[in-house]
């Protein structure tokens, strides 16, 4: 797999912004391609004046959105049974389908935003959105916002730390950990809030029935 990734980087890297778009499309669709390989070097090139931050950001976030729309279309047109049965041909394990579908069902449409920030969920959260026929406009907005935050984070790391790979890995590790904790806190808050709403609703129904 590493040889394939290296070949993609060497082949597509020379394409500039188009290369960023293609690599982020692959990362966001079915190919297990690390987004760090595309966006961090782009940030470093921007720090040297060889790329623009805004065009690099738009290429990265746009590629992520396009890849997510590709997965959305797969889920929408093929459905869950097909993906579970034949997903292995596009690097998609049945347990991955189960995991992201459970995540989507538990947290609803906003999970397409938060899912873009979580490792292991990011690439595949679009599939259950397509299977569940989530409204396309909402899906696009949530996805672009989440992908935009992640792309901007990686660009910033490349811009600030440049060639210092160990520093980038260390900071990225802390960022991912902080994001996971933040997502857990947000979901806990909304789950607790929704539970109170449900309790009040049930209490109201009981009073009306007396």
Image (tube, rainbow, N blue to C red):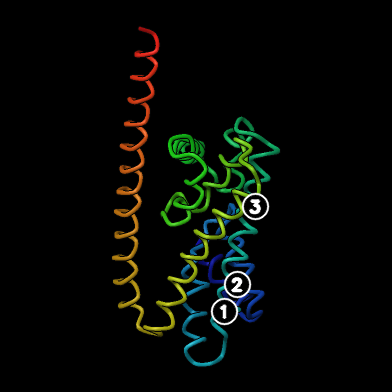
Residue drawn at (31%, 72%), measured in percent from left and top? Answer: 171
Residue at the disc numbered 1: 54
Q: Assign a secondary structure to mark 1.
A: helix
User: Rounded to the nearest whole Å, what is the CA distance between mark 1 and mark 2?
Assistant: 6 Å
Q: Secondary structure at mark 2?
A: helix
Element class at badge 3: helix
Q: Nearer the viewer, residue 112 or 7?
A: 112
Q: Alpha carbon of mark 2 to alpha carbon of mark 3: how far?
A: 16 Å
Which mark, by number, is residue 43? none
Check whether the beta carbons of the residues at disc 1 and disc 2 lie within 8 A of each other.
yes
Q: Quadrant of residue 24?
A: bottom right
Badge 3 is on which residue? 69
The residue furthest top is: 210
Towards the viewer: 167 or 207: 207
Residue labelled with disc 2: 58
Residue at point 34% right, 58% down?
179
First of labels 3, 1 by sequence position: 1
Q: In the image, residue 60 lies at what x, y percent? A: 57, 69
């Amino acid at each position: 797999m590493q040889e394939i990734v290296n070949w993609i980087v060497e082949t597509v890297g020379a394409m500039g912004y188009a290369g960023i778009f293609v690599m982020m499309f692959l990362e966001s669709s079915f190919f297990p391609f690390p987004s760090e390989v595309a966006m961090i070097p782009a940030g470093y090139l921007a720090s040297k004046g060889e790329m623009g931050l805004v065009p690099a950001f738009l290429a990265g976030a746009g590629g992520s959105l396009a890849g997510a729309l590709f997965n959305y279309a797969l889920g929408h047109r093929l459905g869950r049974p097909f993906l579970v049965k034949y997903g292995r041909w596009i690097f998609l394990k049945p347990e991955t389908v189960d995991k992201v579908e459970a995540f989507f069902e538990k947290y609803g449409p906003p999970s397409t935003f938060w899912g873009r920030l979580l490792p292991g969920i990011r690439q595949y959260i679009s599939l259950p959105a397509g299977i569940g026929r989530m409204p396309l406009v909402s899906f696009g907005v949530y996805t672009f916002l989440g992908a935009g935050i992640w792309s901007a984070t990686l660009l910033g790391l490349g811009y600030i730390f440049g060639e210092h790979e160990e520093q980038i890995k260390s900071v990225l590790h802390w960022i991912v950990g902080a994001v996971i904790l933040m997502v857990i806190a947000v979901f806990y808050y909304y789950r607790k809030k929704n539970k109170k709403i449900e309790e009040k609703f049930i209490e109201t129904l009981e009073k009306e029935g007396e």
